Amino acid sequence: MSEEQAGSSQGNAVMQLWFQLFRTAQIHAIDNQALRRPIDAWVGMTNTLVPREGRIALQAKDNALFMNGSKLRLSNDEYALARDVFAFFEERGIGGFLIEAPMTPDAVRKLLAALVYTRERRFDALDAAVKNANIPFRLIRPLGGLKVRAEVHRERRSYAFFTYAKLVVLYRNLIAKEKVIASERAFLLKKIARTVQALVDLCLDDPHSFVSVTAVKRSDDYAAHHAANVAVLSIVLGEKLGLGKVALADLGIGAVFHDVGLRDCPAEILLKPEPLDAKDRALIEQHPMRSVEFLLNQRSFSKSTLSQIVIAYEHHRHYDGSGYPFGSRRPDLFSRIVTIADVYDAMTTPRPWRGALMPDESLARMMRESGRRFDPALLKTFVDTLGLYPIGTLVRLDSGDLGVVIFGGGEGERLNRPIISLVGRDGKAGANVDLAERDPAGKHRWSIVMTEDSRKFGIQTSGIVATSQSVAE
């Protein structure tokens, strides 16, 4: 092996160990035993390479990684890991890191506390926290300067849609087979957990780009898209409630598997175009327990597994105690969050027995059941988060133009005056219009007259959202 090949091999090892360390830290609390092995591996790596190389500098630029100045040669599997490393760096304005001396387990934990177990995303603040930890680790600014904001926004949005699609494929593969061998099941569950954590990172960094992926609606592949949409919506709501990263990951994974028990229900019942009879309804109502059985069939159990089981069991139980299965206690917070996300996505997706409701109509119907079916405080936060016209809604303006909502929610005017992308005659995304903009006399330039059914016009709103111009917040 040449010196260059040896350097690349060492760099690949550093990249993989870094991925394992930060990914495990993002899933587990800092005192969890699961962190012991990646911390020990990181310590062993620094104690071996730093004395030999003098330092370890891992930098990212233009979708490539460099170890002490040498570009790494990445296999397909390694590049999949590298994408997550790129995303971790980019979300924090980091170009890489420099290790100046061997690290101890305590130093690694201080690093994780400063860099991972925080909601901070600004480079200067993270750099100061790492320096204050007094450890031989330094952050490096991006090579070649920072990208313009619009470019970063486009990349984040593209990565959000890519990660969403990855989750859909993984879940589809998991439920497609009647029986899944233990090793394949464990592999898919691990990949799903990692993908959900990537979604959590996206939400914390840019919630508007993140929530835009829920504009994707597929009635012909409902189960997989519904699982992914409910996970995204649950994470968004959980973030607004102030949940930490570990809790958001547990919530997201539980949301993915909330309906997994339906895989055992006959397709002729799930796709029945007419109302279900009592026998069919009874069979459908068994799916929470089927989901629990599926989740219990795992090699090991953790707090995350228990959260998944509770969500699967309770997500059809209502805030006022009704629903099924019967229970004497109010559903858990995570279950109440998933219930809202589950119902909203189901109502806005076409099903064999009914068409999709407009997003604003769905929210209005849900508000009428506030305090009965839904936790009123959580539902209000959910509506405030999405806005009265959620991302992906097709609207008609008083000018006669059609537009798709690409940015909305929050407080004040933005709640009912989102930013839209005009739809051209070719059905493609056009110029952005901010409905909160006023003319010199103080009058709003444009207003929404009504929402429209995108299917009537043959418009795929998720495509408009994905390809629309960037929105500067």
Image (spheres, rainbow, N blue to C red):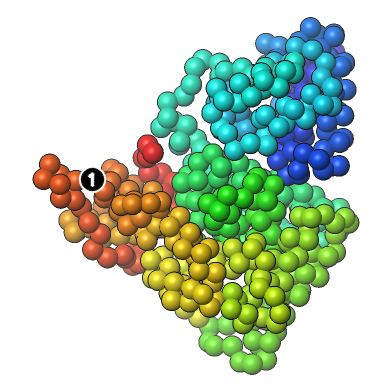
Which residue, as the protein is rendered here, is positioned at the far bottom?
278
**Dot 1 crowding, Cα within 10 Å, few <14, some 14–19, many 20+:** some
Q: Quadrant of residue 300?
A: bottom right
Give the camera-side residue of 453 and 153. 153
Which residue does the image show at 87% across and 17% down from the upper left? Answer: 47
**Residue at which label 1 appears:** 437
Q: Quadrant of residue 142?
A: top right
344 versus 411 height, above or below:
below
Can residue 120 be seen in this snapshot? Answer: yes
* Side of 437 relative to 377 (left or right): left
Residue 295, horizontal then vertical, whole percent: 79, 64
Residue 424, horizontal then vertical, whole percent: 27, 50
* Side of 394 relative to 100 (left or right): left
* Side of 433 relative to 20 (left or right): left
Q: How many marks?
A: 1
Which residue does the image show at 72% across and 31% down from the upper left? Answer: 112
Q: Quadrant of residue 85?
A: top right
Residue 327, horizontal then vertical, whole percent: 71, 79
60 versus 250 height, above or below:
above
Can residue 184 be seen in this snapshot? Answer: no
**Image quadrant for the C terminus?**
top left
261 versus 404 height, above or below:
below
Residue 222, horizontal then vertical, whole percent: 58, 66
Which residue, as the protein is rendered here, is positioned at the far left?
441
Which residue does the image show at 35% across and 67% down from the upper left? Answer: 453
**Image quadrant for the N terminus?**
top right
Give the camera-side residue of 398 and 183. 398
Give the camera-side residue of 177 and 405. 405
- Give, as a three-letter code, the residue at label 1: Glu
7 versus 164 height, above or below:
above
Q: Secondary structure at mark 1?
A: loop
Which residue does the image show at 75% across and 11% down from the upper left? Answer: 100
